[in-house]
Amino acid sequence: MSKQQSPDYAKMSHATAISLGLTRGKMYRGAVNRCVNLLLHYPEGCSASCAYCGLSKKRPGTYQEKSFIHVEWPLFPMEEIIGAINHAPSYVKRTCISMITNGKCREHTLEMTRRLRNETPLPVSVLVSPTILDRDDLVALKESGADKIGVAIDLATPELFDKFRGKGVSGPHQWNRYWEIIETGLDLFGEANVGAHLMVGMGETEKEMISLMNRLWQMGVVSHLFSFFAENGSQLDHMPQPPWPAYLRIQLARYLIEENLVRSGDMGFDEEGRIADFGLTPDRLDEIIRLAMPFMTTGCVGSDGVVACNRPFGNCLPDVRQWNYPYLPDREETDLIKDNIFKTTA
């Protein structure tokens, strides 16, 4: 009997399993998961030790038992996953494979990508692990059928990256290596087909995060925002989420930058690096806030051009106040955003 591991098996987010009918459940306000989120699985797990990650080798428990972004990831055979995708609701628009830092991932990710592209109708993106990849691997990934890649930079500065992902936790990741893979990815996949995962609330200032988003956008890289949300048993399980108003401001800044309405240099910041001026008139800013779109989850889009990787409630518990809305906020939620976005405390 073969081991239940990739490439023959993959973990699937709980929300995806609900969307595909593999698990029973309902989500707050009728939210749906528009992306099939898959995670490579091996009994030995990931060799990295990122301080905030639920899959860190330093987090207690077996890899099979570990949660990731606060949800269970049940294990399914690829045959069952492919069958479920082929009978998925019409709102499911993309599949995303998340690699871990494990040398087996390279070949197995290629094999899984090929199967998904050849046997299902959905486009496939891959959240890559730069530490174990080189240019040839990205070439092979594109040839296998992936149309987009994501790179989880996560931290806004090289110092924070090293503290939480590199030497500070005896981890293997290096800031420069991640940027090399981003640049190679742009060369191979093209602008807007490379996304950078960024995590707010790790000790950076708003100015630092916004400067990073602006740099990425000028390169042709889209920013996929996450809020820090401590995993129980992780090295940082004592840390709170970032203040909600601060996260809202960063979400709004990302929208303005990627809609080419302003650049980071047009914005003003106070002495603590908080946004004090978005570079637009109050009326125009109010109009954009009222759109509510800036506060929705950002991620890879589907064939319809709408964000598919909307990760329902991966950043917070379901509530009227959310750090990433997986749906368009309603009037009550938008009013709450407008009342809080300019506050300097939570």
Image (cartoon, grey):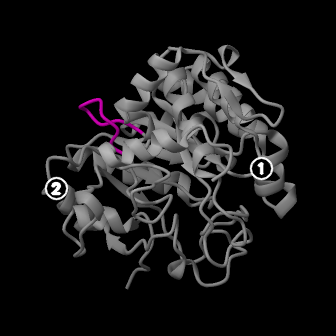
What residue is shown with label 2? 88
Q: Secondary structure at mark 1?
A: loop
Residue denoted by label 1: 203
Nearer the observer: mark 1 or 2; the answer is 1
Structural crowding at the residue carrying mark 1, measured as other residues with C-alpha within 10 Å and reported as few (<14), some (14–19) or many (≥20):
few
Task: Kindly tell me whether residue 141 is visible in this rendering.
Answer: no
Q: Residue at x 76, y 43 (%)?
A: 204
The percent coordinates of residue 41 (x first, y second) are 49, 69
Residues at badges 1 and 2 in contact (C-beta under 8 Å)?
Answer: no
Region rendered in magenta:
300-309
Front one among 145 and 304:
304
Q: Quadrant of residue 272?
A: top right
Specify the amino acid type for callout 2.
Ala
- Decide which of 156, 292 is in the foreground and name it: 292
Q: Quadrant of the N terminus?
A: bottom left
Judged by its main secondary structure, the magenta piece is loop
- Name which residue type carries label 1: Gly
**Is residue 198 rendered to the left or right of residue 84?**
right
- Image location of residue 299, percent across then percent down: 43, 40
Q: Is residue 131 magenta?
A: no
Where residue 100 sits, quadrant-wise, is: bottom right
User: What kind of element bears circle 2?
Assistant: loop
